[in-house]
Image: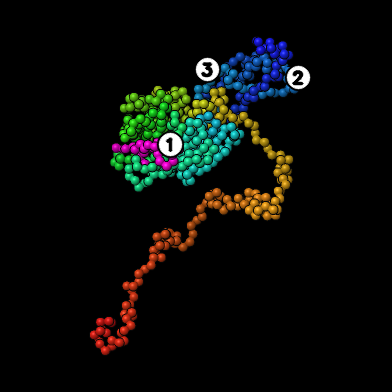
């Protein structure tokens, strides 16, 4: 009140009209609504500004200052004015959806199954990896109504992408492919580090500086941004330091009870506090190590946690650090308690798993478990399953266009991201409970269509003449260098032009065309032909021995 009295004494009544916040009309999201929603229509409760009882989104409550501004502007013009939508000021009743599945956005550029998926901690970007060897970066804030990725690259050539993870600060990306080298990229997709390969001729895995088998999964340390782990088919889990690319910090050698004492480590994970590491293996065992131990043998082990020979897709710790969730390739989801590690707390069977690497996750409040379920027939529709944590009973099922392989539920934006078997990424959200993310795709209008003036300006742009430029910077007639030469060079490059391999032609024998490298070397070896020569021609004194018939008989 004292400040207002001072302003009144100075003759200052205010600082102009309050700038109204630009909001979104809830009706804009109707175009992204799922055709067969699994929940009832959303009703937003609150005091009504009109006497009508027609259903639909409620007009936001306006303050007295805003009403006064509207009265002032009412005489200037008329017409429909888009209402503001501010979820912070709305009062939502108990009928709001529990799961953000009412609306959907599709990101489709991959051509094969999505095998890796990660969302930035802030929820602004999505990183996807596929069996088409590509990684793609998607930015919700930079996409319009027709979503497109802004970065595409092949992290390891013609190898599948098995796993991707954003660091805790979102500035680095860890990419795991079918090779034996882990790679780190920045948030824009530029490579920063490639870690060392191991020596495949060393039998003891503790003495190698890196992996010697295919990498399967990775995980960042939840507390230390400079540390991460990788699992591999060489029966090890290795702890790495980001700053040291030449050798790992620690090696955890997993020993199997099967013959050969080696097994493929399929999944690895840190606990929420970073004190425990877990790994699931191809022999069906589930191991747990304490980070303060010497890693000679696991602290806890369950033999036969899943069926032998099946690929366990994921191992996830709960926030309390006592509960472990595993998604097996034997079509089961199991919950384990580290304090009673003898048998699972709950088991859910008959969850079809046509793709190895299918994962399961906790919901942000850890009341539910989310996983994908496929179909037995090829090309049929899949579904997302919401299971109750206590009993693993089905609480909700959502039909999808294809089988969900990788699923994520981001707690900050409250949206579900699912990677499907047809190469599409489905982003499920709710206009009421979700924030930003896929909702930003509808915040921009349709792209501006080029006009005649724009085209004429582009065609009438004058050419820059540089007659005294160096030959390397000009093409002909002194015109400045353009990208034509670069395009012609890229056209000749079979990798950049994506030219298919030409058919093998030419003469051959026995099903092979041409000669192998070994045949080429053998043909050019110098043969020793002294055994095939007539040595009698080397003696020049034979005519002088004609008088002695015995000597002549011996020589002949």
Q: Position of residue 514 (x, y in %)?
A: 45, 61
As drawn, is 20 to the left or to the right of 275? Answer: right
Neighbours of disc 1 within 10 Å: few (<14), some (14-19), many (20+): some
The mark lying in front, picked from 1 and 2, is 1
258 is higher (above) or lower (below) than 34: below
Q: Position of residue 244 (x, y in %)?
A: 43, 39
The answer to which quarter of the image holds residue 138 is top right
The mark lying in front, picked from 1 and 3, is 1
As drawn, is 106 to the left or to the right of 361? Answer: right
Find out whether the residues at labels 3 and 2 contact each other: C-beta distance under 8 Å. Answer: no
Query: Mark 2 or mark 1, which is nearer the start of the sequence?
Result: 2
Q: Position of residue 313 (x, y in %)?
A: 41, 35
364 is higher (above) or lower (below) than 228: above
The answer to which quarter of the image holds residue 540 is bottom left
* Distance Cα–Cα, label 3 vs label 2: 40 Å
Q: Nearer the viewer, residue 39 or 462?
A: 462
Give the magenta range. 234-257
Neighbours of disc 3 within 10 Å: few (<14), some (14-19), many (20+): few
Q: Nearer the viewer, residue 441 or 34?
A: 441
* Secondary structure type for disc 1: strand
* Distance Cα–Cα, label 1 vs label 3: 48 Å
Q: Residue furthest bottom?
A: 547
Residue drawn at (54%, 25%) of the image:
434
Residue drawn at (42%, 62%) of the image:
520
The residue indicated by pointer 1 is 241
* Distance Cα–Cα, label 1 vs label 2: 67 Å
Q: Nearer the viewer, residue 322 or 101?
A: 322
The residue indicated by pointer 3 is 94
* Secondary structure type for disc 2: loop
Q: In the image, which disc is placed on residue 75?
A: 2
Q: Quadrant of the C terminus?
A: bottom left
């Amino acid at each position: 009140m004292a400040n207002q009295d001072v302003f009144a004494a100075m003759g200052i009544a205010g600082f102009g009209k309050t700038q109204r916040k630009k909001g979104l009309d809830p009706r804009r999201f109707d175009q992204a609504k799922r055709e067969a929603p699994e929940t009832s229509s959303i009703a937003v409760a609150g005091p009504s500004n009109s006497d009508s009882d027609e259903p639909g989104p409620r007009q936001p409550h306006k303050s007295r200052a805003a009403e006064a501004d509207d009265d002032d502007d009412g005489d200037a013009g008329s017409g429909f004015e888009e209402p503001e939508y501010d979820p912070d000021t709305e009062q939502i009743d108990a009928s709001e959806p529990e799961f953000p599945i009412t609306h959907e956005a599709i990101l489709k550029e991959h051509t094969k199954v999505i095998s890796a998926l990660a969302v930035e901690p802030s929820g602004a970007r999505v990183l996807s990896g596929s069996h088409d060897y590509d990684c793609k970066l998607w930015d919700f804030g930079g996409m319009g109504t027709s979503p497109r990725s802004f970065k595409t690259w092949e992290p390891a050539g013609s190898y599948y992408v098995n796993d991707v993870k954003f660091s805790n600060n979102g500035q680095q990306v860890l990419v795991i492919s079918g090779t034996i080298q882990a790679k780190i990229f920045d948030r824009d997709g530029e490579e920063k580090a490639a870690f060392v390969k191991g020596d495949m001729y060393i039998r003891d895995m503790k003495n190698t500086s890196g992996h010697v088998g295919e990498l399967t999964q990775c995980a960042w340390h939840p507390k230390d941004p400079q540390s991460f782990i990788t699992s591999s088919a060489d029966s090890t889990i290795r702890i790495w330091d980001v700053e040291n690319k030449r050798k790992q910090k620690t090696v955890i050698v997993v020993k199997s009870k099967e013959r050969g004492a080696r097994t493929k480590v399929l999944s690895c994970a840190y606990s929420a506090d970073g004190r425990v590491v877990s790994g699931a293996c191809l022999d069906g065992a589930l191991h747990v190590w304490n980070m303060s131990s010497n890693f000679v043998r696991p602290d806890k082990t369950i033999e036969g946690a899943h069926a032998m020979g099946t690929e366990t897709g994921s191992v996830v710790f709960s926030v309390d650090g006592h509960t472990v969730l595993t998604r097996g390739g034997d079509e089961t989801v199991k919950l384990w308690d580290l304090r009673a590690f003898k048998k699972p707390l709950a088991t859910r069977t008959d969850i079809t798993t046509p793709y190895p690497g299918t994962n399961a996750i906790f919901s942000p409040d850890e009341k539910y478990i989310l996983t994908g379920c496929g179909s037995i027939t090829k090309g049929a529709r899949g579904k997302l399953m919401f299971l109750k944590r206590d009993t693993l009973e089905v609480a909700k099922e959502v039909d999808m266009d294809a089988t969900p392989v990788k699923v994520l539920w981001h707690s900050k934006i409250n949206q579900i991201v699912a990677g499907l078997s047809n190469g599409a990424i489905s982003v499920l959200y709710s206009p009421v409970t979700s924030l930003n993310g896929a909702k930003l795709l509808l915040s921009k209008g349709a792209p501006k269509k080029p006009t005649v003036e724009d085209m004429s300006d582009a065609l009438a742009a004058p050419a820059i003449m540089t007659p005294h430029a160096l030959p390397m910077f000009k093409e002909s007639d002194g015109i400045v260098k353009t990208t034509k030469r670069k395009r012609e060079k890229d056209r000749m490059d079979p990798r950049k032009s994506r030219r298919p391999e030409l058919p093998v032609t030419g003469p051959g024998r026995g099903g092979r065309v041409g000669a192998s490298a070994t045949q080429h070397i053998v043909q050019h070896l110098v043969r020793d032909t002294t055994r095939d020569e007539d040595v009698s021609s080397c003696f020049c004194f034979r005519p002088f021995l004609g008088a002695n018939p015995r000597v002549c008989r011996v020589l002949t």
